[in-house]
Image (cartoon, rainbow, N blue to C red):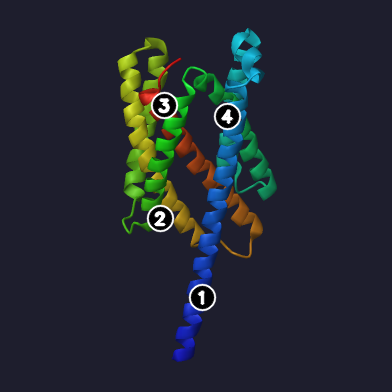
Amino acid sequence: MATQNSATLRRSVSRAEVTNAFLRSVYNWMAAGLGLTAAISFALTYTSLGDALFTTAIGHYIGLGCVIAELVLVFTLSLRINKIEGSTATTLFLAYSALNGVSLSFLLISYTAASVAQAFIVATCMFGAMSLYGLITKRDLTGMGSLLFMGLIGLIIASVVNIFLGSSALEFGISIVGVLIFLGLTAYDTQFLREMGETVPADDATAVRRGAIIGALRLYLDFINIFIMLLRLVGDRR
C-alpha cells in the first residue's frame, strides 16, 4: 500500500511539474510577443522612424495592410495550430506581434507618453489579477466563457457600427464593456490553459509548443485589448 501511494504521489508531482512548465512557456512566449510589440510601437511612435509612417498616404496603407495581415495570421494560427510545426507556429506568433506593433503605433501617436504608461501599468495589474484568479479558482468558468464570447461578438458589431456613426458616447460605452469582457476572458482563458497543461503529453514537444503558442496568443490578445480599451477611457490626447 505504501509503495502504491508513493508511486501515485510521484505521478502527481510529475504531472504538476509538466503543467507548471507548460504555463511558464505560455507566459514566457506571451511576454516575448508583448515585448516585441512594445519595442516596435515605441520605435515608431517616439522616434523619427515613424515620421513617414504617420505623415504620408502610403504609411496609412501600410497600417491597413498590417491589420489585414494580422487577421490572416490569427485565423491561420487558430484554425491550423494542430497541423503546423511548433517552430512555424512560433514564427507566425512573433510575426503577428511585430505587425501589431506597427498598427498599434497609429493609436499610440494620439496619446501622451504618460497616458500610455499609465494605461499599460493599470492593464498589467488588472490582467495579472484576473489571470491569477483563473489559475486558482475552483469554479468552472466554461459557462462564463460562452457568455463572454457572445458579448465579444456584440462588441465587434458595435465597434463596426461606430466607425460610421463616430459617436464618442458609444465609443466610451464600448471601451467600458470591452474592459469587462476581456478581463473575464483573461480568467476564462487562463483556466482553459491550466486544464490544457494538465493533459498535454509531456513527451510530445511539438504538441507542447503548439499549445504554448496558441495559449500565448489568447492571453496576448486579452492583454492588448484591455490596454487599448483603458487607453481610450483614461488616455490624454496630444
**Residue 52, placed above or below residue 44:** above
**Cα distance, mark 1 to mark 2?**
21 Å
Q: Is residue 79 visible?
A: no
Q: Give the label, 1 or 3, closer to the camera.
A: 3
Measured as percent of width and height from the top left, residue 6 is found at 48, 84
Question: What is the x, y in percent for residue 84?
Answer: 66, 46
Residue 100: which numbered mark, if any?
Answer: 4
User: According to the image, label 2 marks what residue?
Assistant: 135
Q: Earlier in the sequence, mark 3 or mark 2?
A: 2
Please name the residue that numbered disc 1 is placed on.
Answer: 11
The secondary element bearing badge 2 is classed as helix
Query: In the picture shown, does residue 234 fall above or below 94?
Result: above
Residue receiving disc 3: 231
Crowdedness near tag 4: few (<14), some (14–19) or many (≥20) residues, C-alpha within 10 Å: many
Which structural element holds mark 1?
helix
Mark 4 → mark 1, Cα distance in angstroms: 41 Å
